[in-house]
Every structure is written in C-alpha cells, then in structure tokens.
Image (spheres, helix red, strand yellow):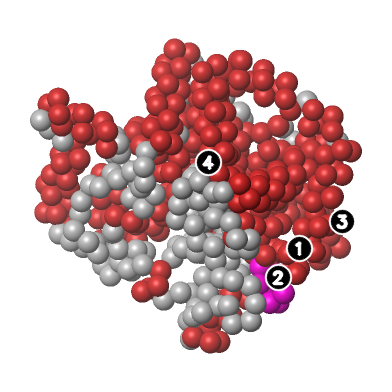
Amino acid sequence: MALNGAGVLAATAMTAELAALYLGGFAFFRHRGNTLAEAGAYAILSALMGLSFVFQLAFVTGTPQIEFLVEAVLVPIALFLCFRLRGRIAALGPVVSNFIRAHGFGAAALALAWAGLLIKAVVYPAPHVIAGPGIGPGSAMGAMAPLNHILLPRLFTRYPIAAGSGIFGLSAHVAIGLATYALARRYAWPFTAFTVTLVTVSMPRLVLLANGSGEEILPAAAALFSILAMYRLVEHPCFTDLALLVMGILFTIADDPLGLVVPPVLILLAMVLLFRRHGTLALRAIVTARWKAILLLAPFALVFSQAGVFIYNLRNFGYWMKNQAVSGFTPNPDGLQGGTANLVRYFIESCHITRPLNDLCTFVTGWSPAAGLAKLHAAVVVPVFGHLGSANAFKIAWATTPRLAWFGPLGFFLVLPAVGYALVRGPRRLKALGVALVGYLYLVALIPAWAPENVRFFTTFFVCSGFFTALFLPPWRLTHTGKQILQTVSVILLAYYLTVKM
C-alpha cells in the first residue's frame, strides 16, 4: 500500500539528503581524476559507510542526537562540494545522455529500471526491511549482529514513515553496475563492458535484492568496491585508494554466518597483488607520508571491524557471534567429503533457467528441467556421497523470492565459465582474483551444511566475478549482434524480476 502524502514527502526529503551525499562524493572523486563509473561507485559506498559510522556511533553511545548533529555537518559539506565542483556534475547529464544513445535499448532499459526502483522505494514500503536495533540504553536484546549494514535503514525508520529503506538495495545495485563497468573496461571496449554490466545487474537474485533494504547486497557491493580500490591501488598507489580499500574490506563484515570469511580472502588477495607489483616500498611510503591521516581514520576502521560488537557478545553471552539458532546456520558435520558433495549440489542448483522458462518447457515438452536436475543429483551425488554435508533433502526451488532465487541462466552459462577461463587464460591479476573467489566458493561449500537458503552466501561471489565475462566476450568470440542478443536477454530478465510479486 502506498504512503500518504506526508509520508511520501518525508521519504523524499531523506532521499534528497542521501542524493546530496552521493552527488558531493561523485564531484569530489571525479575531480580527483576517477572515471565517471569509478567516481559513482566510490561516492555511493563512501556515503553509505559514512552514514553507517554515524549510526553505529550513536548506537554505541546511546545518543541519537549524534545522528542529526553529524548529518547537519555532512549535508552542507556535500552541497558545498556540489556547488564548488558544479562543472563536474553539469557534465554528467550530457555524458549519460550520450551513453544511452550509444548503447541504445539496453542502456535506456537500465536507466528506466533504476528510475522505477527509485520511485518505488520512495512511495512504497520496502519488503523484508530489517531496521536493526534501536538507539539508546537497553536497546540491544540478546547477542548483537554486526551493525555495518542493518543500521542504515534508520535514515528512514527513525521517523514514522514506512518507505525509503529500499533506497539502500537500489544504491548497492547501482554501485555494483558502476563498479562492474569500471572493472570490465580494463579488459574490453565500451560496448562489451556495458553488455557485461547488464548481464551482471540483471541476475535475478540481484534484481530482487535491489528492491530491499540491502542487508545482503550491500556487503557484496562493498566487496566489489574493495576490488575496484585494489585495482586502482595496484595501478597508481595513493593514500585515498588505500584508505578506501581498508574501509571497504572491513565494511563487508555483515549480519551473515559467513560474514567474516570475505575480509581475510580480500586481505590476502590485496597483499598478493600489491606486493607482487610494488613490493613493500610503495605502501611504506604512503603510510610514512600520511600517518596523521591514518590515525584519523583509525576510529572508522575500529567501528567497521565490529570489534565492539564481538567483545560485547563475548562478555555478556560467552560467544562472540550470534548462535546457530538465531542465524539459521547449520554447520557441515562431514568435513571435506561433505564440502565436495555440496560443491556438486550447488553447481547443479545454479543451473537456474528461471521458473517461467522451466514452466514453459514443461508445458511444451512435458519435461521439467528442474525435475531433470533433481534426477541428476539422485543419479550422481547420492550414490557417491549419500546425504553427506546436507541439512535438508535436496530440491530445486528456483523461487522468485530473495530467499531462494539464484542468479539466472547468464550467471550459470556465462559468469561461471568466465571464471574458469580466467583461471586458465586470464592475466595474472585476474587469475589471482579468480583463485581467491574459488577459494571463497569452496569455503561456502565446506562450512555450512547444504540448505536451499544457502544461496545467499553466493551473492558476493557472483557480484565480484561478473566483470570476468569481459575477458570471455571478445569480438572474435561473440559478434556485436551476439552481444545485442545478450543485452536483450538481460533486459527481459531485468523486466520480469522487477515486476514479479514476492
């Protein structure tokens, strides 16, 4: 149900505040020499990290007044940057217009999709909003989850309005699109890079999560943001990208049973890439020259690390993360055998041709691909592994809800092969990233027992590996017409999952 006029006005005002922060950040990063896509992705995640820091500080101190005080400072600074660097913002309109003309139907469809999600977020309550704990003494009941993302909807929920929180899922979706394009451009020409971007943002699960408050998609966007900062740092070492890399990695810590797996993977990857390219001299020079700025950023790193949350849980409850009953997490009791079985299960399950296509195939031929994959599991996995590593009976759900939706046919037939191709034929940097992502994939299969809801653990993998497809789609492998067909399929997926009822 839509809000009343006052509710829409209040949600619009908060959205305008967020837009001011985004535009101010965009102007700042564009002025520093970032490409348009890099500046957009940096601006969105930097603004969200800033808001998260403020809300967490207010939560820890029990003083919600801090939120309004800091916002009263940040918004005028953002508006000043918008005015001072207005030429950068003014140039955005013609660039976007020319981009849409150059890329035609696909670009126009994506722009309309984001505009529709924006209107929907302002006018209608977002589904599955978790507003996080309240602010003030005694507001935390029981063990606390990491607060990096679950407090962000307070920008809207602290007022008596129901809408607005969908802005955060949309923001993450836009940031993923921009970062994917920025990374894909390092391996492909613009038309191919945009095709890769459209393939990534149209994956069914990401489209559905773009309509929510961001608890799952934001950590994935932060991981991709970190990879973008990592690339820039390897190419041109500077303090800003180093600071954003560290903050982005810590910001991936989420209200998720595997929320602590991603940061070590990214830290190890960054060390490999940076030390291989520059040794320790470049980073040592940055730290030596900017040690005062590093000290100023230390509180941000401490807050995003969630050290306070973990210490609070340990002192009051005897464990530092939420217990299994609260998190809905069942460990895999069968070790490497269970993990290997789960890898095969997830691979079968990821062949997500979508429910409408499955229903159409069943109607026309009388054969259901989903049922066929279930039989494949029974014929291949069960005789070898039985039910090792599984917490539930295996089934193919392919539901059109954020709880069970996978990543669509393009995720299976393009993104997964692209990662495999990069591992064999990719340049060293992409190969190292591929190894890191495959390592994360195996940890996802090894640590939790298989359950249909475990698809949520794969969001970071598919978001971070989407741009690998740029290396997989050169002109000699897929013509311009072939890429247009891919864009059309992506737009159809995007349109369907934007309109589906959850």
Residue mark closest to the camera, 3 vs 2: 2
Determine the CA span between mark 4 and mark 3: 47 Å
Q: Which residues are magenta?
A: 56-64
Q: Secondary structure at mark 2?
A: loop
Foreground tag (1 vs 3): 1
Give coordinates of residue 189: x percent, y percent: 59, 21
Q: Are marks 1 and 2 in contact (CB under 8 Å)?
A: yes
Depth check: give the residue in front, 349 or 238.
349
Sequence-wise first label, 4 or 2: 2
Residue 289: image tag: 3
Q: Amino acid at mark 3?
A: Ala
Q: Which residue is mark 1?
A: 68
Amino acid under disc 2 = Pro
In this orientation, which residue lies closer to the viewer: 241 or 84? Answer: 84
Q: Residue placed at 41% from the left, 76% from the top?
A: 323
- Whether the magenta-drawn stretch holds residue 238 is answered as no
**Is 111 on the left-hand or right-hand side of 453?**
right
- Label 4: which residue? 120
* Residue drawn where x is 36% and y is 74% of the image: 325
Q: Are marks 4 and 3 in contact (CB under 8 Å)?
A: no
Tag 4 near tag 2, CB within 8 Å: no
Which of discs 4 and 3 lies nearer the camera? The answer is 4
